[in-house]
Image (tube, rainbow, N blue to C red):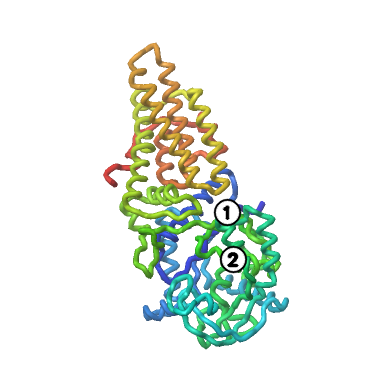
Amino acid sequence: MKPYYLTTPIYYASGEPHIGHAYTTILTDTLARYRRQMGSQVEFLTGTDEHGQKMKEAATQKSMHPKELADKMAKNFKEAWVGLDISFDRFIRTTEDAHVDVVQNILNRLWEKQEIYADNYSGWYCIHEERYWTSREVGEEHVCPDCHRPVEYIEEKNYFFRMGKYQEKLLEHINNNPNWIVPETRRNEVLGFLNQPLEDLSISRPKTRLDWGITLPFDESHVCYVWVDALFSYVTGASFPSTQSKTLKNYCWPADLQVVGKDILTTHAVYWPTLLMASDLPLPKKILAHGWWLSKKTKMSKSIGNVIDPLQLREKYGTDAVRWYLLRDMRTGSDATFTEERFATRYEELANVLGNLASRTTSMVIKYRAGRLSEEIETELGEEIEQTLDNFQKHMDKLQVHSALGLAMDLARKTNVYIDKKEPWALAKDPDRTNSLDTVLGTLVRILTVLTTLLSPVMPEKMGALAKHIGLDKIPTFEDLNLALTTRSTLKSGAPLFPRDHL
């Protein structure tokens, strides 16, 4: 069976990883881990985009060759993802020989099909965004509509992809598949973009201006436009056959899910599918476009100087607390504002609700039952557990991660109330209420077991520790939850999951 294949964007390697990169990657990782919990085989791709003019200029400023800078930044991104516990299966680099071969193979196919043609271009070009703009788009001030930097006027020969030819076919696909782009607001943005005639896409740069890129197979004086190069890395990463590997073994395209930021939605929901249509390749099954992290209502940006280093947050609060905050505090698909105060609030939630529940439960089972207990469950909370499991999976399947996490935390919060209501410390003093005490403790441990499963995709390290505290040798999958009732060993005390001295 084809694995469930999901991708992050291929991050541009001219700058260090920041909180925007971290959010996208942690979100994708959480969805990948959830799929594994559900029993799916998963292929999770991330990587670095290493060609283009920005990369060349960044290397020049550092007195480095572009490949030298690319090697350094790929290492930095990999180390950042390892530090944030990202379970990627494949880290692709667009300078890999296999990827160069795939891109040239596909471009040659498009050239032979006459999907690409040569023409002269004159107009406004943004070096930072590496794209052309019309006079109307740049206005009288001649600034890029996206990054608001000055643009320059260019006249040169380019090769163009007949993107406009596929406008109606793309519109038909979007209208026939209303959940292809989520959330709905992003789908509507793409439909609005497609209300205007779709122009053909410049897919090359002359080497006289830029020589750092993949050479066109049909014209050695031009290199491939960096966005076209980067987009096809998703296909390369799916083990698309190349001269290095001519087999379709392990080929997992199309992607089941591609996660992107809203600023690159047009590229992924217009450029990318039309290129795939022309290449006779299937489209990705779903595109999730998330919002931006803001600082004082302004998008975090390296040029503005307000970006947050996720690894510094990790050093202060721990990896899982960073992962929790980013996914719990941003409504999937919407913008969110980062503040240290909000981070502290979410950490307090972990410490005072989940951490407190784990500590209270394990200490009582150890104190009153020497770490062992029966698995009788309170009927009322048993129904609550089943409803939470069912609704959690529904939200995750709809990619509403923030809502799913909220459900899990609500279950932990209700369980703390249950403890206060049942007063197991009072039951322990009454010999006639032994069975009642066993039921209460069994219910608490059962809920902690369920929470390890629900929360392990977002907090794998802490939920692994919690599983050991409650006598499990590993975090149960959804399918294994019932087995956890009969395979539990003695509960053990341990260090607090979320120490309050981090606050």
Asked whether the beta carbons under mark 1 and mark 2 sit within 8 Å of each other, the answer is no
Where does residue 412 sit, x and y in percent of width and height? Answer: 42, 35
Q: Residue furthest top?
A: 432
7, above or below 94, in the image: above
Amino acid type, residue under disc 1 in the picture: Glu
Amino acid type of the residue tagged 2 in the rendering: Phe
Q: How many marks?
A: 2
Q: Residue furthest right?
A: 113
Residue, x 54% and y 32% (percent of image)? Answer: 386
Q: Give the x, y percent position of residue 133.
A: 53, 77
Task: Report crowding for label 2: few under 14, some 14 to 19, many 20 or more residues within 10 A (C-alpha).
Answer: few
Circle 2: element type: helix
Q: As displayed, is residue 424 above or below residue 322?
A: above
Residue 288 found in image quarter? bottom right
Which residue lies at the image location 37% right of the left edge and 59% below the top edge? Answer: 295
Q: Which secondary structure lies at badge 1?
A: helix
Q: Residues within 10 Å of mark 1 (few under 14, many from 20)?
A: some
Identity of the residue drawn at 69% across and 55% down: 176
In the image: residue 97, left or right of residue 331: right
**Closest to the observer, 468 or 19:** 19
List x then y, in percent, for residue 126.
Answer: 48, 77
Q: Which residue is mark 1?
A: 184
Is any atom of residue 5 visible in this view? no
Above or below, comparing residue 97 to residue 18 in the picture: below
Snapshot quadrant of residue 311: bottom left
Q: Which residue is mark 2?
A: 193
Distance of label 1 from label 2 (alpha carbons): 14 Å
- As rendered, which of 456 and 205 lies closer to the eye? 205
Question: Relative to residue 299, is residue 202 depicted above or below?
Answer: below
Residue 443's disc number: none
